[in-house]
Image: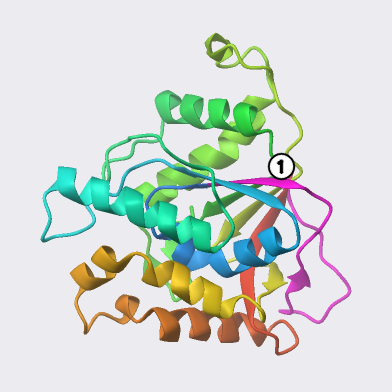
Amino acid sequence: MTTAPASTLSPGELIPFPDDWDRALAIVAHPDDLEYGAAAAIAAWTAAGKQVSYLLATRGEAGIDGLAPDKAAQIREAEQHASAALVGVTSVEFLGHRDGLIEYGLPLRGDLTAAIRRHRPHLVVTFNHHDTWPGPRWNTPDHRHTGRAALDAIGDAGNRHLFADSGLEPWSGVRYAAVAGSPYASHAVDVTATLDTAVASLEAHRAYLDGLGPDNWMADARTLITSMAEQAGQRFGGRPAVAFELLLY
């Protein structure tokens, strides 16, 4: 695995995201992770005929302070299905790892390896696995562990001697991994046409946003999504964009 090579663009400028792939699998920890980081790009990809599937490590049961975990899990699953449909994604799976307590290790790597072998993607999308967010702000264990396990599972999926009890054929066809929300973004997708869709996809997580409270900056979907796209766009020719760290496999 290597970082994508530098281009002839100016230092700090984001490179257009590669288009030579057909299927993507997005692997994240929680409902709403993709909506906070990548949904506008996913909407652009599906509009262009790409196939994207979602795999979530948890059901998000610990994410709403005012709801019991069992009730929250039911609501958040339904909200994630509705949100995904808005950006053209119909395949949404939940692994059932414990929200807030995801552990990096063989069980998680095995689950993600099996998913990659089932879906056979050319692109794996995940969420920031680094210790910090751009800023910097400290990242959570769930994000760090899920993202790192996803990147490792790409290699695992291609080795028929690893996690062989799944009964699935190896898959070595992943060309790229794209990390949303990374402090080391290198590439970007023009989302001029899909910003409103991305806002709607985050707003579909209504119970979660309401649980944050009206004064929480993360609850203002339109302002947040628009400002993120504009900030990335400053490094992408002024066009609204979603930025990714791109890794090659």
In this rendering, the answer to whether 196 lies above or below 185 is below
Residue 57's image quarter? top left
Q: Nearer the viewer, residue 205 or 141?
A: 205
- Tell me where residue 84 appears, x and y as whole percent: 49, 56
- Seen at 79% across and 49% down, the residue is 21
Q: Residues within 10 Å of mark 1 (few under 14, many from 20)?
A: few
Amino acid beneath label 1: Met
Say whether residue 226 is magenta.
no
- Seen at 34% across and 82% down, the residue is 220
Region of the chain picked out in magenta, as a range: 1-26
> Can the viewer see residue 142?
yes
- Judged from the image, the secondary structure of the residue bearing numbered disc 1 is loop
- Tell me where residue 25 appears, x and y as whole percent: 60, 44
- Seen at 77% across and 56% down, the residue is 4
> Can the viewer see residue 61?
no
Q: Which residue lies under the disc numbered 1? A: 1
In this rendering, the answer to whether 50 lies above or below 99 is below
Q: Main secondary structure of the magenta part?
A: loop
**132 left or right, relative to 173:** left
In this rendering, the answer to whether 44 lies above or below 80 is below
Say whether residue 15 is magenta.
yes
**Image colouring:** rainbow
